């Protein structure tokens, strides 16, 4: 049974050339979290890339800040159907962080403070597609949006852009993350509406 | 407003979990695998992300129960739960 | 016996504004199984293009045949609440399922004194408990502490002003002086008072409100095992 409610439209939805199917554009920046906001002290913050051979590459907060910064302006798309256009960020490209990392891995499992994880192909972190960001719209990234630092992979649904990021584990075989083990899509391309496994 | 508090009570799971359980699961009690604490499902701290629900232990904040309504069905993950005790009429 | 919760069709038989931003919808739901005060329903709206949105609303009335009432607060940036407050007319049909939630409920057979603590539109399931007490002729002592911004934001104000013997109502207004003379301000310890003997406590409101009320209740010596809470998130139910 389904009743259509005349006069109910819901949020104004795409698609347009900037809004993927099933999404609506918002000026807000909704806060969505799968758990409490962790308390992270910058003097104890670290970001670690671990290769499939167990080799660790670690940056402290100051070491991360000393790397070249980029300021990408990108559109972001959340699986809960909002999209936000022209968001501006400041951070370090994953190309820089992965530059001296020796690996044969095809997959990455991203880890966050608080226990969150998400998986994606390593290729999607390379070639100017992904950053570890700590600035948003000219200021520091707020804790509820993933500060002190989050991953930014804007060409995939935003759950892949893990908040409170603390490391990336490089893997020879794909390993599903927090939402992916609950039936969310392993890749998550918003333009192909890959919300759930099988989409 | 701080966002540390942006969870709701486990009561909110009553509707979504009616997709997969024939009884009201919010009145059931659980034990958290992380810290052993017993809670009624209605007392868990639930983070709602669209049609995804993460119910955490009020003690240690570990996920006890997770549920998502996907395009093909409901996915329930109980790996954070030691046991689920459901009150049934005698 | 297995009774999987089905989506039901409810027809709006009555609609009235409680405040400028809140409206009560009375629905007639054939096949409604009855409910306990404190339970809620999920309402699902479907747009012509198939888009769907679902929200939970507490039931505002005690069980009454196939009738169910909800009181919806319009949220400025809401998606569903503006439609329910301004878009729906008497005669329209809405899809719903329920009743759901068997924990945040008051059983009319209980004789234990009850303390209800409401923040904003969190008063709705607590009003249902108050109404259930009156409808069933219960003599359990009830006290409602209701925090709202101003007097104009108080839902069901006339009914609360006419509360019968054995039911105490205290308004805590955060932006103006209360009718009792209490100065404007958030809920404080002395608004709640200490328990004398066992009390069943029900707290409902935005998450931050429930969090601070529950902490105060425990500080005052209320038994944690007798405190039941329903947090509904940031500001309300969008």
Image (spheres, coloured by chain):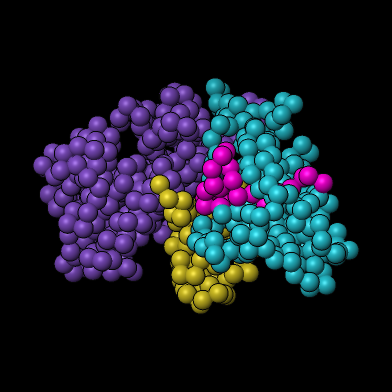
Chain colours: A cyan, B yellow, C purple
Residue B74 drawn above or below residue A50: above
Whole-percent x, y for residue A145 in the image: 55, 48
- Please tell me in which quadrant of the rendered image residue B21 appears: bottom right
Residue A135 drawn above or below residue B36: above
Residue A165 drawn above or below residue C72: below
Q: Judge whether residue C10 can be spotted in this image.
A: yes
User: Residue, x 27% and y 41% (percent of image)?
Assistant: C148
User: Residue, x 43% and y 45% (percent of image)?
Assistant: C234
Nearest to the observer: residue A49 or residue C86: A49
Left or right of residue C170: residue C62:
right
Whole-percent x, y for residue A105 in the image: 85, 62
Nearest to the observer: residue B49 or residue C229: B49
* Number of numbered discs on residues: 0
User: Residue, x 81% and y 50% (percent of image)?
Assistant: A126
Left or right of residue B24: residue C159:
left
Whole-percent x, y for residue A19 in the image: 70, 30
Nearest to the observer: residue C59 or residue A152: A152
Residue furthest bottom as drawn: B36
Left or right of residue A168: residue C112:
left
- Please tell me in which quadrant of the rendered image residue B17 appears: bottom right
Q: Quadrant of the N terminus of chain C?
A: bottom right
Residue furthest front as drawn: A66
Residue C32 drawn above or below residue B31: above
Q: Judge whether residue C146 can be spotted in this image.
A: no
Whole-percent x, y for residue A73 in the image: 67, 36
Magenta extent: A127-147
- On whether residue A105 falls in the magenta region, the answer is no
Residue furthest right as drawn: A104
User: Residue, x 39% and y 38% (percent of image)?
Assistant: C70
């Amino acid at each position: 049974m389904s009743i259509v409610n005349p006069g109910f439209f819901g949020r104004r939805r795409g698609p347009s050339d900037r809004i993927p199917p099933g999404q609506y554009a918002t000026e807000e920046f909704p806060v969505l979290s799968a758990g409490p906001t962790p308390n992270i002290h910058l003097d104890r913050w670290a970001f670690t890339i671990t290769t499939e051979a167990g080799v660790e590459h670690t940056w402290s907060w100051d070491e991360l800040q000393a790397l070249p910064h980029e300021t990408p302006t990108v559109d972001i798309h959340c699986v809960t159907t909002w999209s936000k256009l022209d968001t501006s960020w400041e951070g370090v490209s994953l190309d820089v962080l992965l530059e001296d990392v020796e690996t044969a891995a095809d997959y990455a499992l991203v880890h966050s403070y608080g226990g969150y994880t998400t998986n994606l192909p390593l290729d999607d972190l390379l070639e100017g597609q992904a950053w570890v960001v700590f600035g948003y719209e000219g200021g520091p990234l707020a804790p509820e949006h993933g500060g002190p630092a989050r991953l930014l992979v804007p060409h995939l649904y935003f759950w892949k852009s893990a908040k409170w990021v603390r490391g990336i584990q490089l893997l020879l075989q794909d390993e599903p993350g927090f939402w992916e083990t609950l039936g969310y899509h392993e890749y998550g391309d918003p333009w192909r509406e890959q919300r759930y496994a099988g989409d | 407003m701080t966002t540390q508090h942006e969870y709701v009570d486990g009561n909110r799971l009553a509707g979504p979990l009616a997709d997969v359980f024939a009884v009201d699961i919010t009145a059931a009690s659980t034990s958290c695998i992380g810290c052993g604490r017993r809670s009624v499902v209605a007392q868990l701290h639930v983070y709602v992300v669209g049609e995804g629900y993460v119910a955490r232990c009020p003690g240690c904040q570990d996920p006890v129960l997770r549920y998502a309504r996907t395009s093909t069905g409901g996915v329930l993950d109980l790996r954070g739960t030691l046991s689920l005790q459901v009150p049934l009429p005698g | 016996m297995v009774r999987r919760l089905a989506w039901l069709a409810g027809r709006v038989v009555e609609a009235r504004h409680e405040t400028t931003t809140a409206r009560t919808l009375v629905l007639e739901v054939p096949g409604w199984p009855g409910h306990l005060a404190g339970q809620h329903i999920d309402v699902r709206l479907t747009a012509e293009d198939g888009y769907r949105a679902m929200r939970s609303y507490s039931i505002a009335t005690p069980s009454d045949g196939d009738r169910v009432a909800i009181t919806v607060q319009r949220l400025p940036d809401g998606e569903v609440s503006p439609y329910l407050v301004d878009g729906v007319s008497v005669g329209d049909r809405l899809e719903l399922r329920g009743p759901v939630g068997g924990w945040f409920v008051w059983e009319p057979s209980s004789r234990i004194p009850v303390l209800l603590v409401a923040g904003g539109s969190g008063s709705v399931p607590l009003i249902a408990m108050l109404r259930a007490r009156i409808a069933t002729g219960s003599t359990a002592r009830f006290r409602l502490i209701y925090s709202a911004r101003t007097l104009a934001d108080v839902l069901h104000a006339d009914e609360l002003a006419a509360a019968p013997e054995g039911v105490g109502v205290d308004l805590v207004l955060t932006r103006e002086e209360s009718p009792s003379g209490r100065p404007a301000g958030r809920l404080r310890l002395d608004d709640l008072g200490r328990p004398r003997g066992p009390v069943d406590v029900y707290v409902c409101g935005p998450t931050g409100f429930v969090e601070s009320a529950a902490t105060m209740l425990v500080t005052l010596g209320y038994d944690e095992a007798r405190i039941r809470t329903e947090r509904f998130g940031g500001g309300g139910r969008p």
